Image: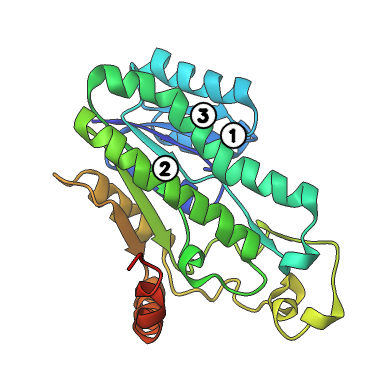
Amino acid sequence: MSTWLITGCSTGLGRALAWKAIASGHHVVATARDATTVADLVALAPDRVLAVALDVTVPEQVTSAVAQAEDRFGGVDVLVNNAGYGYRAAVEEGDDADVRALFETHFFGTIAMIKAVLPGMRARRSGAIVNVSSIGAQRTPVGSGYYSAAKAAVEGMSGSLRGELEPLGISVTIVEPGGFRTDFAGRSLTQSSTTIADYADTAGKRRKEHDTAHGTQAGDPDKAAAAIIEAVEADSPPAFLLLGTDALTTYRSVAEARTAEIADWEKLTVSTDFD
């Protein structure tokens, strides 16, 4: 039995993961900005589930959430940084305040949670950190430049973090989901108030009013939750985990295209060394 602290449990993957962890017999700290939205999860196993109000952009709430987890269950064994939302805009259309808020949640909120749990994990020389990214960090679709950038920042940090924590018995796993049938492309999707006509045929086609993906995604959140638990409980958790056939196909396509372009420009690449 482990203690899982999961951010963003009100809907989607976070809720599915909390439910699966509870069903698997674990202690679960289910967090959401409004703790009443996860009260039903507590009812599943009141002795093993704690609901905590948490906005990852508020330092006092981050500190309090981890302290409550430690007081109730003795520590956090698994941290899942899942809280987040989508943002659609051409790069030129992005509102500065919106973009900063996006990074505050996805990147700086993730950092805050990691820093809050690490003293306990280091003391115990054990633990697992799961940072939920997106295949968008690889695919970088038009209209999602800022979201892709935020997730790429999380991935870059996670790679370094893994090297720092592995000798201390703490694993770090980046999870890159493809499209899953959650609220991500619905209620959780935001977009810029500014629109520029020149981007109508690129980023404009992916604005909410033109997006038909919501509710049709191939990915099953319950199966994703089970996969994450299996990965975390493996003898050697992966550094990088794709979720969904679409994520796998996209990743391979991007990698192949990049490899081909590297080969095309190899001569110019190596020309920059001293003779």
| Up-down relation of residue 140 to residue 189 (above or below) | below
Q: Position of residue 53 (x, y in %)?
A: 60, 29
Q: Report the Cα–Cα distance between label 2 and label 3.
A: 11 Å
Amino acid type at mark 1: Val
Q: Would you place residue 258 above or below residue 146 in this image? A: below
Q: Residue furthest top?
A: 71
Q: Secondary structure at mark 3?
A: strand
| Residue 178 visible in the picture | yes
Give the mark, 3 or 1, whose residue is nearer the N terminus.
Answer: 3
Give the number of the disc on residue 51: 3
Query: In the displayed image of the protein, which residue is found farthest to the left?
Result: 235
Residue 59 is situated, as x and y percent measured from the top left of the image, at 61, 24
Disc 1 secondary structure class: loop
Mark 2: amino acid: Ala
Q: Mark 2 vs mark 3: which is more N-terminal?
A: 2
Q: Residues within 10 Å of mark 2 (few under 14, many from 20)?
A: many
Which disc is residue 18 wearing? 2
Residue drawn at point x = 62 percent, y = 53 percent: 85
Q: Contact (CB < 8 A) between labels 1 and 2?
A: no
Q: Is the residue 31 above or below the residue 260 in the image?
A: above
Mark sitting earlier along the chain (1/2): 2
Q: Which numbered circle lies on residue 56? A: 1
- Place residue 235 in its image quadrant: top left
264 or 260, which is in the foreground?
Answer: 264
Q: Amino acid at mark 3?
A: Ala
How crowded is the residue under tag 3: few (<14 C-alpha within 10 Å), some, or many (20+)?
Answer: many
